[in-house]
């Protein structure tokens, strides 16, 4: 009987040790909400650091304060991408966010962008620059807006909310971005992205209005 | 020894029964994503039913199809409110959603609305109607937009995303609304609502431009 109890205790200890090891290995999923407006800060150091050790780093002389804010936290989450980045954005004119996206593309991350045709044509849009850098961009040809504002990092982290990626929105508006590391929500948005990506395939573009003679 | 085993088995059964009962009592938290555009459907039956047994119910003769869609699911989540509803919306011009909010107000739900001053002044806005019905509304006086689009039902369910509550957005745009029943996220948005609600207190309103003579 004593031997049976000892066996049972050893088995229980093993199960506990295994559970503790799994617990350690799986960091708590990210759950965060970023609220805007974000105070204007200098993001030069953050972006230069992300360029990697080969990049020339020069201290920025701009008068903006350094520190942490909603924009720098959004940038950090984005720059954590290692494999893939899906962007589904109504408007994209923030130079800092565009620089981060180009940097990821250069680093070998597979970047795909879906955007709205009307917004893309507006002054200050960064979409042309992204395309010029070789990033795949697709846009709608619908009368309604492609009004989503979400990003998916490495197929595992979703950032979504009210924020268009514009300096106006970042610095002046009341906005939110939820950061969600949750398979169920991520899958729903990734499926939506793939649906739209396929629908906006350039082979479906009409280059002349349907009714033109 | 046999008695000890029997005691242990009884204790285990008790724990299991208790766990099962707790499991039954706590329904799985709602986790849903609604994607738009939503096909136009008739919401008359859904809204009339929510008016309660005292309301006169007449079958709607409109030609729109009946059925389930993103809008009807959003309406149902909203109409589930029993105690409180916080709305923080850039634009609100959907007649169906406005009717649901008025209905909740009449039912005794404490409704508070925060919105954007510029958007509120636009044609088709339902904000005037809500105010006329006695619902508390506060708005910004900032140069930036109050661009949030979220609702909190009974302090426990958050609905947030890219969707402005307009017929244009509901029927024509690519949009998303996350439905989240999660204390941590709900608290973050509720805190943001209370911050804005206090900042937009009418005693802080300026009724003349600062620089006017």
Image (cartoon, coloured by chain):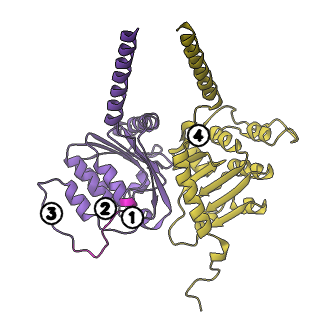
Chain colours: A purple, B yellow
Q: Mark 1 falls on what kind of element?
A: helix
Mark 4–mark 1 contact, CB under 8 Å? no
Chain for disc number 4: B
Label 4 packing within 10 angstroms: few (<14), some (14-19), many (20+)? many
Which quadrant of the figure has residue A28?
Answer: top left
Q: Nearer the viewer, mark 4 or mark 2?
A: 2
Residue A85 magenta: no
Please provide the residue range marked out in magenta. Answer: A61-71
Q: CA distance from mark 3 to mark 2?
A: 18 Å
Distance, label 1 to label 2, CA atoms, is 8 Å
Question: Which label sits on residue B38?
Answer: 4
Q: CA distance from mark 3 to mark 4?
A: 49 Å
Q: CA distance from mark 3 to mark 1?
A: 24 Å
Q: Are marks 1 and 2 in contact (CB under 8 Å)?
A: yes
N-terminal-most mark, 3 or 2? 3
Q: Position of residue B33 (x, y in %)?
A: 53, 38
Residue hosting label 3: A57
Disc 2 target residue: A95
Q: Are marks 3 and 2 in contact (CB under 8 Å)?
A: no
Disc 2 residue crowd, few under 14, some 14–19, many 20+, Cα 10 Å = some
Secondary structure, magenta segment, majority class? loop
Crowdedness near tag 3: few (<14), some (14–19) or many (≥20) residues, C-alpha within 10 Å:
some
**Chain under numbered label 1:** A
Task: Please say whether residue B92 is visible from this viewpoint.
Answer: yes
Task: Locate residue A123, reporting x and y percent.
Answer: 37, 64
As drawn, the label of residue B33 is none
Count of marks overlaid on the render: 4
Q: Which residue is mark 1?
A: A167
The chain letter for the residue carrying disc 2 is A
Q: CA distance from mark 4 to mark 1?
A: 30 Å
Label pair 4/2, CB-CB below 8 angstroms: no
């Amino acid at each position: 009987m004593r031997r049976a109890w000892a066996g049972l205790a050893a088995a229980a200890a093993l199960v506990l040790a295994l559970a503790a090891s799994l617990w350690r290995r799986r960091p708590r999923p990210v759950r965060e909400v970023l609220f805007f407006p974000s105070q204007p800060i200098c993001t030069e150091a953050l972006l230069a650091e992300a360029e990697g050790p080969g990049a020339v780093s020069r201290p920025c002389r701009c008068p903006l304060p350094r520190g942490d804010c909603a924009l720098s936290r959004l940038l950090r989450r984005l720059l954590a991408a290692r494999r893939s980045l899906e962007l589904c954005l109504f408007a994209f004119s923030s130079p800092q966010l565009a620089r981060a996206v180009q940097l990821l593309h250069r680093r070998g991350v597979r970047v795909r962008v879906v955007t709205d045709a009307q917004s893309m044509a507006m002054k200050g849009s960064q979409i042309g620059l992204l395309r010029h850098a070789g990033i795949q961009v697709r846009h709608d040809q619908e009368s309604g807006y492609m009004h989503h504002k979400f990003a998916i990092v490495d197929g595992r982290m979703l950032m979504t909310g009210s924020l268009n990626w514009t300096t106006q929105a970042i610095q002046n508006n009341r906005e939110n971005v939820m950061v969600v590391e949750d398979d169920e929500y991520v899958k729903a948005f990734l499926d939506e992205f793939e649906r739209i990506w396929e629908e906006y395939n350039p082979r479906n573009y009409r280059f002349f209005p349907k009714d033109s003679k």
